[in-house]
Image: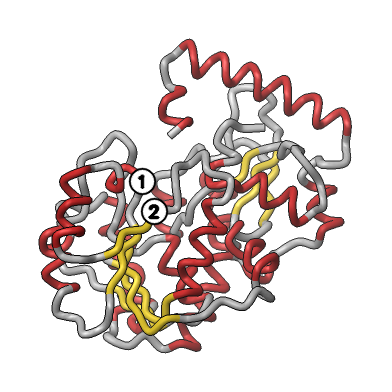
Amino acid sequence: MNLDNNWYGQTFILNLITKNKNKLIYGGYQHGWISSINATKTKPSLGERKFLKNLPFFCWNEKCFNNLKKVNKKKLNFFIIGSPFLYVDKILSSKKVKEKNEILFFPANQKIQDSLRSNHNNIINFLNKKKLKVNVCLFYKDFQNKKIHDLYKKNKIKLYCCGTRKNLYFYFKLYNLFKQHKYIYFNSICSGLFYSLFLKKKTLLFLNRKYSNYLYDFEKKDILYYKKYYKFLFKKKINIRKGFELAKSELGFKHLRSKEKLNEILGFKSNIKQIVCKIYYFLSYIYFKLTNKLKFLDM
C-alpha cells in the first residue's frame, strides 16, 4: 500500500512466502532496522497516516513494537512480523553456498540527500593490513561514485552492490554475499550487523571515528546503549552464541508468521483490501509526484 513497502523487495518477499503474486500489503511495513533509541526518540509518528488512520503497521521486533505503542498517542494497529531477511533465510537456507575464507566489509551509508559518511581512504588503509582477501559492499550512491570506484580499484579490492531500493532481489543478493564470506566487518551499528550475527559469521564492529566522516545523533545514542547492555559487540571477537541470540531479538525471529497468518493480517486474501491498497497507492504516487518527492522513493 505505502510506496516504500516494496523497498528492497520486501513486498515481493512476502508474496513468495505466502505463495502469492503482486499482492499489496494492507498497511505499512518497516524497512531497515530501528533501534530502541531511534524508535523512541526520532520515530514518534512512525506508522501514522493522514488518511485511513487505522491502517495496520508491521514492525520487526518486540522492542520497536512496545516503543511505538508508547510514543504514538493515536490508536494504531501494530503487528510484529519480523525482518524480511528472516523470510529470505527461510527461502534460501537449504541452498548450498560455498563459504570463502575472505572478508566482506560494509562501509556505513547515509541518507539519500546527505554527504558521504564513510572515510574510504582510511578504510582502505585498515583493510590493506589484513592478510586475507577483502571485498567491499557499497551503498548504491557510493557505488555510482567514480572516485570511490577508482580508489578501490587502485587497491585491487573487489566491489559489490546489491542495487537500489527498487531492486526486488536486493535481499537475495545481500543474503548470498553474507553466505559466501566467512568474515564480515562493519563501521556502524546497522541492519547488516544483525544479519551477519544471525548467520553466525565471524563479525567485527569497529567504530573508530577516523573511519566515519560523521555520525547521526541517534547513532551516538545507539552506541551508548549497546555499549551499556551488549559489551560483547565491541570486542575483537564477538561471541557467536551471544551475537546470534541478540540478532534473533533485533530481527524478530520469534515473531515470524506462518503463510496462513501473513495472508490474513497483510490483507492478501481480501479483495476489498487489495482494491483499497491500489487506490491508496495510486493517490500516494500522484501526491509524491506533484510535490517532487518521488525521486527519493524511486532511488
In the rendered image, the quadrant that contains the N terminus is top right
97 sits left or right of 271 in the view: left
Q: Which residue lies at the image location 73% right of the left edge and 28% below the top edge?
A: 277
**Mark 2: few/some/many CA within 10 Å (<14, 14-19, 20+):** some
Tell me where residue 25 appears, x and y as whole percent. Answer: 71, 39
Residue annotated with mark 2: 161
**Mark 1: few/some/many CA within 10 Å (<14, 14-19, 20+):** some
Q: Which residue lies at the image location 43% right of the left edge and 64% below the top edge?
A: 192
In the rendered image of this protein, does residue 138 appear above or below residue 158? above
In the rendered image of this protein, does residue 87 appear above or below residue 287? below
Tell me where residue 243 appears, x and y as whole percent. Answer: 46, 81
Q: Looking at the image, is mark 2 or mark 1 earlier in the sequence?
A: 1
Q: CB atoms at circles 2 and 1 under 8 Å apart? A: yes
Name which quarter of the figure residue 154 lies in.
bottom left
Q: Which circle marks residue 3 in the picture?
A: none
Residue annotated with mark 1: 140
* Nearer to the camera, 95 or 206: 95
58 sits left or right of 98 in the view: right
